[in-house]
Amino acid sequence: MTADPRRSPLGPVGAAEPSTAQPGVDSPRAQWLTGVGHVSYGGDYNPEQWPEEVWAQDMALMREAGVNLVSIGIFSWGLLEPSEGVYDFGWLDRLIDLLHAHGIRVDLATPTASPPAWFFHTYPHTRVVSRDGTVLGFGSRGMVNPSSPEYRRASVAIARELARRYGRHPALALWHVHNEYGAPVSEDYSAVSAAAFRAWLERRYGTLDALNAAWGTAFWGQRYGAWEHIDVPALAPSIVNPSQRLDFARFTNDALLECFVGERDAIRAESDVPITTNFMAGACPSVDLWRWAREVDIVSNDHYLTAADERGHVGLALAADLTRSVAGGRPWILMEHSTSAVNWQPRNVAKRPGEMARNSLAHLARGADAILFFQWRASRSGAEKFHSAMLPHAGTGSRTWREVCALGAELGRLDEVLGSRVRADVAILWDWESFWAQDLEWRPSEDLDHRERIDAFYDRLWRDGHTVDFARPDADLSRYRLVVAPASYLLTAASGANLARYVADGGTLLVSYFAGIVDENDAVHPGGFGAPLREALGVSVEEFLPLRAGERVHVALDRAAAGPAADHAGLELVGDVWADDLVLDSAAVVGTFVDGPAAGRPAVTRNTHGAGTGWYVSTRLDVDALAGLLEPVYRDAGIAPSGLPADVELVRRHGADADFAVVLNHGDQAVDLPLTGVDLLSGESAEGSVKVAAGAVRVVRTARP
């Protein structure tokens, strides 16, 4: 017997269980973003780092910058509860009253991401133990065992006290539970977690026979005869059972989620104000945000550019699209991003003039109705003293400050965008459990990087002007013309059937290599590699043929199948990393390997299934080569590249009475685009053409077609 995978309590800890309800759908609290009537603007505010005489100056400068929402209390546990059970709210009382007097709303955090020194002194066994057995010390953040009963009890207690004191304060706009769950550590390998893991497994599987079958413990003589024999998958002489590793990742996700639910429910008993926690969509792989999004009233996200990536704006777009997708298409909050450089990357590159506003409005284009930063005033001490801020060390004479004020004024002109939605014709499949499984050891090639494939396909779609949703493989996909599966290593039989129905009903599906290989237990499917996709794709994989480092293969496209792609790609595409030995069922060959281990064998196939088509590509194509592959795929899907100039993106938000075209020019040349409407930022009207300067943004209200 297998328990409902959505219910995974940690046994003796007695934590609240995640629900199956969706507050973001079912609760009127989800309408808060639209109901406030204006785009929210501000950031993390940590006035406890400064003398109180500085606070009045902060209030005046916030008003000057257009700030209307700040997050407070995120790392204040040691001040709010200086010793166990003893609370001091005086300074927070004064701060919240001061913010309210100046018309600034409060996003009040529970400070549970960083327990105080007294907590670890009293409960030293709650410290995180890493996989190699190292006990992590105090002095950082996020370093507590989420399965610890003492931590859960203390975190719920401080959340309850805050809710009782401030739950009905007129300044309170939002509750912010914890901070960035899963970062910087998520997994804990202590004895406490081992006991909780065993309880989780017993609830999931019911019997040891079921667990042994799911984990394939007959291999390497790993069969378990008692629950107490099961331990956490710590470092071992060779690799640890991958099914156990996958379940431990699920357990870790659930342990963190139950911590959130415990605090959330304590707050909800005292306050009806909306509750969120800041996700790190695309940047924190240890939490399954499809599940987490069901538990918050409003989805919020933190995003920081990777300074080494010259196309960081594409990664930003991906994170924003992923956030909107886990939010179910509803507006969301950009809870943190940076005004300029961060402090924790190898080379912390400063943003160029105008880049901060362009980044902010790119998030807004893709569904964010609130734009916040880390942080308001730059810290003089601590690990993040070199992190940029709205009010930098250089003060109000700086370019950053001028841009912060200008952005506040611009956002003040965009209130009518609130509540409008982004629509996409294309979806990319995204499944955290599949990623957890694929990223384990002893796969056929160390070059099987799930994120690299997703980034490559997303970048190609971005360059072709397609707005993208992300979706679970078991979701309703009927509204999409094209669904892309760049990395679906773990694919259940049910999800495979769902994709087959999507194709049969007229959809176009494009699948990349190493897909549909294992089931939910990381066991190879009966019927071999790719079995769940055989109906949709009309092809199966007889053998993997991974390539040596640096080896390349060439793929000749069939002219009749490639159509317009022939001229674009010269009928030959270059791949690397991977090849498959494919067995055709009902699929037709579109591309053939010219050389390499699969020379003369199919490389790209197309299958007609019902009213739709299923495509399969069995080698790694880079972003340029993907253009040649995607042209005939687009033709099947009834879509086409937008023809936008390079480094220009256009995203549409659809409101009740009007549409809004957000144009972002990331290039160094001005462009003209065919648009008619009113630019909300400048007030200028455009009839047939809008000029967008290099590095500039336009938000054009257009008539509903």
Image: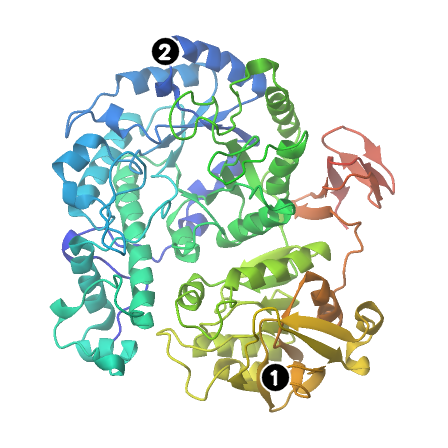
Residue 103 lies left or right of residue 179; in this view the side is right
Which residue was labeled with disc 2?
A: 52
Residue 303 lies left or right of residue 227; in this view the side is right
- Badge 2 crowding class, 10 Å Cα cut-off, few under 14, some 14 to 19, many 20 or more, is few
Residue 352 percent across, percent down from the top left: 66, 32
Numbered disc 2: secondary structure: loop
Residue 405 percent across, percent down from the top left: 61, 21
* Residue 607 appears in the rendering: no
Residue 22 percent across, percent down from the top left: 40, 53
User: What residue do we see at 68% from left, 59% from top?
Assistant: 460
Foreground residue among 515 and 290: 515
Foreground residue among 38 and 632: 632
Which residue was labeled with disc 1?
A: 597
User: What residue do we see at 34% from left, 66% from top?
Assistant: 246
Residue 632 percent across, percent down from the top left: 75, 73
User: What residue do we see at 57% from left, 20% from top?
Assistant: 65
**Above or below, 236 relative to 613:** above
